[in-house]
Image (cartoon, rainbow, N blue to C red):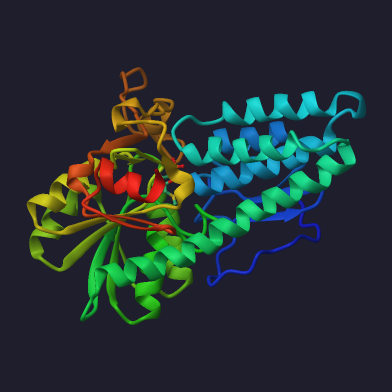
Amino acid sequence: MSKNSASQTEIPRNTGTVAIRWSQSALELLDQRLLPREEHWLTIEDAPGVARAIREMVVRGAPAIGISAAYGVALAARTADDGRWQRDVEAAIEELAASRPTAVNLFWALERMKGVLSECETREDGVLRLAAEAVAIHEEDLASNLTMADLALEAMDLQRPCSVLTHCNTGALATGGYGTALGVIRRLHERSLLKRVYADETRPWLQGARLTAWELMRDDIPVTLNAEGAAASLMARGDVKWVIVGADRITANGDVANKIGTYSLAVLARHHKVRFMVVAPSSTVDMAMETGDQIPIEERDGTELREMGGIRTAPEKVRVHNPVFDVTPAGLIDLIVTERGVVHSPNVAGMHNLFG
Ligand SMILES: CSC[C@@H](O)[C@@H](O)C(=O)COP(=O)(O)O
């Protein structure tokens, strides 16, 4: 990975934040590990570089991971040996698939790329068609974000502005360019229906503090950073009417895997009669998995908990429990909003209705 800012294609979006840029020979990623202190772009020219960027969280968020992996496959066709280019691209797909386990968007995007690969006869054809498919995946995700924002507002049917609570980062940084949960929040703001968004800091990686607060402030959306331990007392005050979150995988019964801490928020929301909405494109739905307990949950290195910003904040050798996603049971969810439509009080029948 090297620093560069060559000419590139930018897909238009309705926010100032861009995190993924594509030029035909390289993928440019805004390094999310360094935000909000530094805006630093990395230029990646091969699939192993993209797999590393996903693994190391240069790029994160379920849709953004899928989009980046698709571009990684396009790069693999460019760098492959003429004589065995299809095998090289297949090996790259395997490497990309091993980068992170939970967000199904990664595997969904790679399946789409495999389908195109199987139709390409020459490497030249593959270079062009795989790049075009990756751009299509990127553009479709952005279009889904915009549709979901419309559908969510319709379902919320708000008569007056309200405050909402969100978790992790689900905005332009995590998607094709507008956001899932944060896209809904942007749209509430655009329609003058948002009083304030409380952004959970989202331990241990601090996606909320480092990314959501940064992204919303750039777009002048009123945001208050919230320690996750303060979520219960915040809800008890009665100001927050909705919790709005994204997802990494939704199973056939409506269970939702999302950033660790989402499940706690859903329990709190039910106790305080706050409504709970999940916003995710259909690429996050995994109908092949029946229930959330089958979802592979990523465990990341203990240093994420023992240290903060490189400074040790716990005994060096303490054992650490660091699952970075949890599963919210469908029964705690009021709405799942996708670009195909809305599932109310999700269950097997409701999910099959839209995705069966
Ligand atoms: C639109 S993003 C939805 C989810 O991907 C998001 O909430 C999340 O859990 C991201 O986790 P991350 O570990 O930062 O990749």
* Apparent side of residue 325 relative to residue 345 in the rendered image (left or right): right
Which residue is pictured at 18% across the width and 59% down the height? 275
Residue 190 in which image quadrant = bottom left
Q: Position of residue 13 (x, y in %)?
A: 58, 69
Image vertical order of residue 99 relative to residue 10, above or below? above
* Quadrant of the frame with the C terminus: top left
Of 278 and 253, nearer the camera is 253
Which residue is pictured at 75% across the width and 30% down the height? 89
Q: Position of residue 309 (x, y in %)?
A: 45, 41
* Apparent side of residue 21 relative to residue 152 in the rendered image (left or right): right
Q: Position of residue 167 (x, y in %)?
A: 32, 52
Image vertical order of residue 27 relative to residue 287, above or below? below
Image vertical order of residue 22 relative to residue 284, above or below? below
Which residue is pictured at 64% across the width and 26% down the height? 95
Which residue is pictured at 89% across the width and 42% down the height? 124
* Apparent side of residue 172 relative to residue 258 in the rendered image (left or right): right
Residue 340 in which image quadrant = bottom left
Q: Is residue 289 visible?
A: yes
The quadrant of the rendered image in which ligand 1 is seen is: top left
Q: Position of residue 315 (x, y in %)?
A: 32, 23
Q: Is residue 61 visible?
A: no
* Quadrant of the frame with the N terminus: top right
Count of numbered tags:
0
Which residue occupies the extreme right position in the image? 83
Residue 209 in which image quadrant = bottom left
